[in-house]
Amino acid sequence: MDIKIFDSAQELDAFAADLIVSTVQNKPAPVLGLATGSTPLGIYAKIVEMHRRQNISFQHVTSYNLDEYVGLTPDNDQSYAYYMKSHLFAHIDIPSNQTFLPNGMAEDLEAECSRYDSMLQEQPVDLQLLGLGHNGHIGFNEPAEALTGGTHAVKLEQETREANARFFASMDEVPELAITMGVGSILKANHILLVVRGADKADIVKQALTGPITTDVPASLLQTHPRVTVLLDREAGRKL
Ligand code: GLP
């Protein structure tokens, strides 16, 4: 693992955006794996700025998002589809038919998960951006005795719902189910970019990166991947 610790959010965002843009520029048909949450916001803002100022084009890019809530329509401002559109897709030239998220409104969730996996199999991810949950989850792969390899529907942990409640009007509105790429799908990416910010994640960063590889900390499985770049701010990296 290549671990980099940054003094400022701006430096971290610029480094991550450069890495993503260089993947976009160096491949004829790049596939990006994208994430939501508060962590990637500065990175997406920087990418939008690079698109505007340096004319970086995303017309040949395909993207797959890690996860989506079950039961929220794409025009619900808490859905991840809405998040991606408002923070990134609407501001760059990526064609809308090349951006994919699991469909949380699908009637048959199982069929939706297999459909998503088949697409991922045909278009393997070149660079997967990842955030980290306080309990070590990646995507919505929660700590468990056993983890699921492929895309699947998952019941969210109370802790995860509480952490994400800040984006909703009330706790009751936070969905109980989500669809997420599995840890197996995530580990198939050629290069993984894990980004973590904040003192509240310093302990889980230490466990995930230096602790035992265990399904109790899903992010610890990243230790088995040959190409992981970890970007931390000072606070998230302070226990390493
Ligand atoms: C959410 C998302 C994850 C994200 C994590 C951290 O539950 N499903 O993909 O990485 O929580 O979120 P944040 O970046 O807001 O701390």
Image: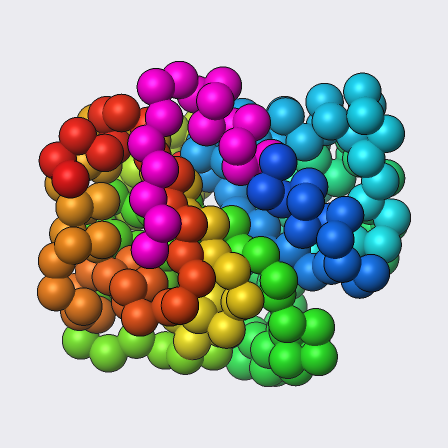
- Image coordinates of residue 193 in percent, x first then y, are 47, 50
Q: Is residue 5 magenta?
A: yes
- Image coordinates of residue 159 in percent, x first then y, are 23, 46
Most foreground residue, 197 or 227: 227
Is 196 located above or below residue 189 in the figure? above
**Image quadrant in which the N terminus is located:** bottom left
Is 230 located above or below residue 232 in the figure? below
- Image coordinates of residue 65 in percent, x first then y, are 59, 55
**Image quadrant in which the C terminus is located:** top left
Most foreground residue, 107 or 223: 223
Ligand 1 is found in the corner quadrant, namely top left
Q: Is residue 149 magenta?
A: no
- Image coordinates of residue 36 in percent, x first then y, are 52, 43
Most foreground residue, 162 or 229: 229
For the point 18% across and 68% down, the residue is: 213
* Lateral position of residue 10 relative to residue 80, left or right: left
For the point 22% across and 53% down, the residue is: 209
Which range of residues does the magenta coloring cover? 1-17
For the point 50% across and 73% down, the residue is: 188
